[in-house]
Image (cartoon, grey):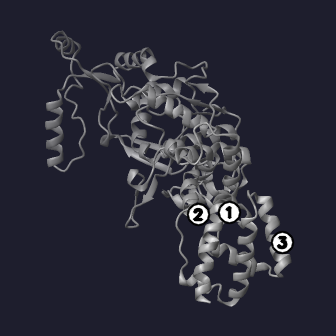
Amino acid sequence: MANDYRLRFAPSPTGPLHIGGARSALFNYLLAKKNGGTFLVRMEDTDLERSSKESEENIKDSLRWLGMDWNEGIDAGGDYGPYRQTERLPLYQEAVQKLLDEGKAYYCFCSEEELAGEKEEQLARGETPRYGGKCRSLSKEQQQALLDKGVKPVVRLRVPAGETVVIDDEVRGEVSFDTDGIGDFIIVKSDGIPVYNFAVVIDDHTMGISHVIRGEEHLSNTPRQIVIYDALGYEKPYFAHISLILGRDDAGKLTKMSKRHGSTSVVAYKEQGFLPEAIVNFLALLGWAPGGEQELFTLDELKQEFSLDRVSKSPAVFDLEKLKWINGMYIRNASGERLLGYGLPFLKKAGLVGEEPTAEEMIWAMRIIDALKNHISCFAELPEIIEKYRGEIGYSPEVLESLRECREDALIVVKTMKEKLEKSANISVDSYKKMLKEISKETGIKGRNLYHSLRVAKTGEEQGPDLDKLSIILGRDLMLKRLNAFLKMFQRMV
């Protein structure tokens, strides 16, 4: 195997980029970049019925959004193209013909009904289903006679009997398979289209792929691919099969990640207002363990830190709360301009600003996002939290009890703030801060008695955004309304 690191991501464009696919792409990308190698992207589009241009564009857009730009492959070009399987059929045909000429593959004319019957009989005997080899010894004359009748054959690989296929997996260690359990499998369908296991070997070899990092579910494909590598005399790449991603259902049971556990595509998380660097950070930790206690990594840091020897065999658990925590941390540290870019679409959708926001609305949006950035885990929560603070509120007995010891101060503070708001036409963060200072100076009340009293009066809560920032969310009129309501209610109680 050459020392040059050449790794690839080769999805089937049959749907949006799945979280599991994104993690496989990331691990390939990181290993390539860490070692100064090449990361390429190609499309395995031989599933003609399910493949679509829309899915291909979604996958490419998602990879770019996550920051995984590729320097060879689809759209980027390179010396080993084309990079779509449907455009590489002559390469597959050449390889198939070589195997046929050398007697390492043969035409199979068995019908689907025959094969189904054979499989049923094997299962009834408790055997692992495999092709029985009926067409293995057909003479050239017999083959030609069937071809002349218009029977369209598949091509099967002649798998050596009684051998052991050993895979020295970079993650799972040594894994062995018995060729007698594989049987002569199909490498080209009757329509001339190669099956996945055959095409992927030709592609990886002709593109000089050095390492193949993919999901554990592909491990069962690997012995077939090894047999093909050997039949063609190709040098094999290093294989690394990373663990499954599991999700926890409503009963707490761990099962393979699916839609019942939440969103499964990258674009779905993008649409919920997750930041790309948060998703990359989260995906990196699904099965890979950094050397220290650090949990937040930039993409550049991951390129330096990543290694296959720290990738676990154990299944990774998709923890949505952990993803939200990571995303929240990135939101808190993002620039105001970037936060506005992510948050504005959600404010528009909720009708909180116009489709073409005015300058005043843009300023308000920037201020309100800044006020709430420490209290959201993704931008989809923005309208909900704004509505929470602007909607109807109540004063629970527990919250009111928290004012019992400072009830007299609370009344003074709330009355004084009400008077100041009535004299002010507009409220800003700065003007509100000034009011708080004035109230403290005029009344001699400060600390918890000042701030806690106002928070409870305005929100019915004991915790939340800073009071000066909360003033932007509520606005002058709503604050006055709530202070008046609080005073009527609280004066009766004391």
Q: Is label 3 in a helix, a strand or a loop?
A: helix
Residue underneath mark 1: 470
Q: Position of residue 289 (x, y in %)?
A: 62, 57
Q: CA distance from mark 2 to mark 3?
A: 25 Å
Which circle's residue, 1 or 3, is located before the other in the chain?
3
What is the spatial separation of the Cα atoms under label 1 and label 2, in whole angstroms? 9 Å
Specify whether 229 is left or right of 380. Answer: left
Residue at disc 2, secondary structure: helix
Crowd tier of the residue under label 1, counting other residues whose Cα lies within 10 Å: few below 14, some 14–19, many 20 or above: many
The answer to whether residue 292 of the structure is visible from this angle is no
Up the image or down, 209 lies above or below 95; here it is below
Which disc number belongs to residue 389? 2
The residue furthest front is 423
> Which of disc 3 and disc 2 is earlier in sequence?
2
Q: Amino acid at mark 1?
A: Leu
Q: Quadrant of the N terminus?
A: top right
On the question of residue 265 being in view, the answer is: yes
What label sits on residue 308 in the rendered view? none
Say which residue appears at 68% left-offset and 47% top-offset. Answer: 339
Residue under circle 3? 438
Instruction: Give residue 351's position: percent from left, percent from top.
Output: 54, 46
Quadrant in which the C terminus is drawn: bottom right
Could you say which is closer to the camera, residue 316 or residue 372? 372
